[in-house]
Structures are given as structure tokens and as C-alpha cells.
Amino acid sequence: NAIIRLFNVTKHYGGKPALHNVSLDIEPGEFVFISGPSGAGKSTLLKVLYLAETLSDGQILIDGMNLSRISPARLPFLRRRFGMVFQDFKLIPTLNVFDNVALALEVAGKNPSFIRKKVRHVLRITGMEKKAHMLPPTLSGGEQQRVAVARAVAGDPDIILADEPTGSLDQASARRVLEILLAYHKKGGTILVASHHLQQLQTVVTGRSIVLEKGRLISATRLEPYAI
Ligand code: ADP
Ligand code: ADP
């Protein structure tokens, strides 16, 4: 009953391997940390999952659906099962906080009253409701990332993929962002977090740590949280 299955996933950019024969099963509700040095393939692993990059070889199944056989018409529905968080937030600078979070729900065709309620809710749980009318460039990095996390969870995704989500944040902000991700995880969400500074992350949760090195999965271990 894995929600994500990778079979011998290989990705080359030109001739250069970024992922090599990566096989991995992820159970629903798992918290998975992906670590490894810069260039190890962490971002590429997340990108092939949310279909930002195609595979060179191997297969990925999401709930048994083979990503390489998904019809273009079903792609948007599959993508909506993923919430994305990036190191550089990727908020739209000219839209206020509320509209940044609302946008994906509008594109998904949700009705306006649902969207209003949902956006208010996720801004409340991320502590950003008072800044709903601010533009992202006027916010701190930590605040922008909380908006990005609000946006990621607003669509009720099954899976959150976070690429260095705390990489540009100070410790207090990083902790706050992790706590929000953790709350989502406690409600049953599956989370993959890629980071080259794992220490900070692994203090918060029971999960699995996988390590990539030069595109290969070199270890996978269970983590128990130590006190924070
Ligand atoms: P990490 O996230 O662990 O830093 P990446 O997945 O970003 O690693 O990169 C893995 C390897 O693939 C690196 O050697 C990187 O330079 C290369 N790479 C990543 N994206 C591209 C791309 N779009 N074109 C060419 N090479 C890329
Ligand atoms: P990350 O590790 O988070 O992907 P990078 O700075 O490595 O951040 O990459 C930034 C962007 O450049 C990404 O879209 C990545 O795919 C692309 N990229 C990374 N390495 C290369 C490369 N060697 N050639 C071309 N594009 C690359």
C-alpha cells in the first residue's frame, strides 16, 4: 500500500547522471528526509515526482498509477495531489498573500466561498492571517515561507514535497515552518523534505532518513526524534 513507489529511477541531464537506479517505497503518512551533499540529486528526485522532469529510465507509481502512462488530461489532477514548497518560496510578488494562496484553488475550479474559507483557515494555522493583504516582497523570509506552506496545504494534497524549505531561514523561522509541516504530517499527510542540513530537521519527528550521493541512494534509516 505504498503511496509512492520508485523502481530503478534514473535521470540523466545530457549524458550526466543526476539519479541512478533509485528504488524506494514510501508509505502513506510517512515523513521522509532526503539528505546528501549539493548535487547529489535531491532536487531531481522531487522534480521527477511532481513531473517537472521526465525519467530517463525506471518507473514511478503514485497510488499504483504509473507516471509515465498518465494521460495529459489527468495530469492536472495528479499534480494537485502534491503540495510544493521551495527554498526560494516562489510566491507571485505582485499578488498579496491571500491571492497567492487562493490562486491554485481558483485554477482548480473551487467556488469563491470555499476558497475564502480555506485561505483564511490555512493563513490562520500558519500565523499569517494578519498579513493577508501584504505583498510577498514586504515580508520576511520566514513569513514568505509560511505563506508558501499555506499555499501548499490549501489544496489538501496527499503529499508535500519540500526542497530545502528552511534553507534560507534563521533558526526560529525554520522551526516554525517545520512545526507547520509537522502538524500537516500528524493529520496523515505524507511529506518528503530534501535538505543538506538534516540535523535541524530530524529533531522534530519520527520518520525515515534517506541519503543520496552522486545520484545513488546510499542509505535509508529510521529516525526517532530527540527532544527539542
Ligand atoms: P541537489 O538537489 O542534491 O543539490 P540536483 O538534483 O539539483 O542535486 O542535481 C543533481 C545533478 O544534476 C547535479 O550534478 C546538477 O548539476 C545536475 N542538474 C540538475 N538540474 C539540471 C539541469 N536542469 N540540467 C543539467 N544538469 C542538471
Ligand atoms: P537545486 O539544488 O535546488 O536544484 P540549483 O542551484 O542546483 O538548486 O539549481 C537551480 C536550477 O538550475 C534548477 O532548476 C536546476 O534544475 C538547474 N540546474 C542545476 N544544475 C544545473 C546544470 N548543471 N545545468 C543546467 N541546469 C542546472
Image: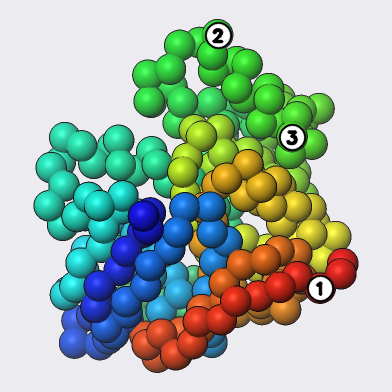
- Please provide percent x and percent y for residue 209: 57, 76
Of label 1 and label 2, which has the lower sequence position? 2
Q: How many marks?
A: 3
Q: Amino acid at mark 2?
A: Ser
The mark that comes first in sequence, 2 or 3, is 2
Residue located beneath label 3 in the image: 125
Query: In which quarter of the view is residue 24 placed?
Result: bottom left
Residue that appears at 32% across and 79% down: 22
Sequence-first tag of 3 and 1? 3
Q: Are marks 1 and 2 in contact (CB under 8 Å)?
A: no
Separation of residues labelled 2 and 3 (CA atoms): 19 Å
Q: Residue 113 has which mark?
A: 2
Query: Residue type at mark 3?
Result: Ile
Where the C terminus falls, by quadrant? bottom right
How far across and down, in percent of the image, does residue 143 sit?
75, 46
Q: Are marks 3 and 1 in contact (CB under 8 Å)?
A: no
Residue at screen point 69% across, 52% down: 182
Q: Which residue is mark 1?
A: 226
169, above or below 20, in the image: above
Question: Relative to 181, is 101 on the left or the right?
Answer: left
Judged from the image, the secondary structure of the residue bearing numbered disc 1 is loop
Q: Position of residue 188 (x, y in %)?
A: 57, 45
Q: Amino acid at mark 1?
A: Tyr
Camera sees residue 144: no
